[in-house]
Image (spheres, rainbow, N blue to C red):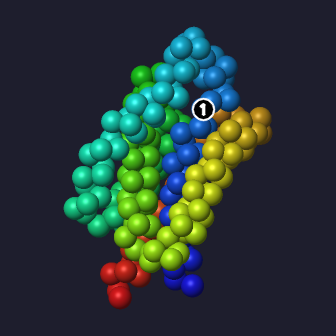
Amino acid sequence: MRKWLAVAVLSSNLALHNLQRFAPVTLYDEFRQLWNTDYTGAGWLFAAYLVAYALMLFPMGMLADRIDNKKLMLFGGGLNLVGTLGFTLAPDFATAMLARVVLGVSGAFLYVPTVRYVVTSFDQASRGKVMGWVQAGAGAGQILGLSLVPLLTHWAGLQGAFLMPAVAALAVMTGQATQLASTLSS
């Protein structure tokens, strides 16, 4: 049972990562109007995450080889929460861009340690199955980012919709902390 809780947490890490990665895509018009920018500016809101994420993957791999992966994931969840709140409450385009960069860095903290944890913590006979479940979380995050966030925008506005990923980040961090505590107590 404890292993499947770990799998759920690992899957949630990638769901959160991909939720944030894709959430702005369908809302370009809303962001253009909010911050008086063009489609290129709105596109940079999407790209800021990807650039920061890509630049952090190699350094994160080095950290993941040296630091407890659960602690890195928990830090990534915290960064995601901070970046989400920063983006949601951004008073201007520059702050929104900075928050998206923080979110991209958080993505590296969520993705690399998650995959490394699967490879190092599950036996070879179950590793593929576990990786499949974890990657299903990635797909779920993409779907939520591309469908649920825009849907919530109609009911709660742009800021209200982007509070949903903050709630998701809190839930993921709770799972991560529970997993970390169970490791420290055993």
Residue depicted at x 63% and y 23%: 28
Pick whichever, 166 or 43, lies toward us.
43
Residue depicted at x 59% and y 62%: 132
Q: Which image quadrant is residue 4 in?
A: bottom right
Residue 149 appears at what percent x and percent y? Answer: 68, 41
Residue 64 appears at what percent x and percent y? Answer: 29, 58
Direction left: furthest residue: 66
Residue 45 appears at what percent x and percent y? Answer: 51, 26
Judged from the image, the secondary structure of the residue bearing numbered disc 1 is: loop
Direction bottom: furthest residue: 186
**Residue located beneath label 1 in the image:** 24
Q: Is residue 154 visible?
A: yes
Mark 1: few, some, or many residues within 10 Å (few <14, many ≥20)? Answer: many
Does 54 sit above or below residue 170? above
Tally the marks.
1
Residue depicted at x 62% and y 57%: 136
Does 146 sit above or below residue 62? above
Pick whichever, 110 or 164, lies toward us.
110
Does 97 sit above or below residue 164? above
Residue depicted at x 33% and y 36%: 55
Does 103 sit above or below residue 13? above
Quadrant location of the N terminus in the rendered image: bottom right
Left or right side of 163 for 152: right
Direction front: furthest residue: 125
Q: Is residue 11 visible?
A: no
Residue 92 appears at what percent x and percent y? Answer: 48, 23
Quadrant location of the C terminus in the rendered image: bottom left
Left or right side of 7 for 29: right
Tag 1: amino acid? Pro
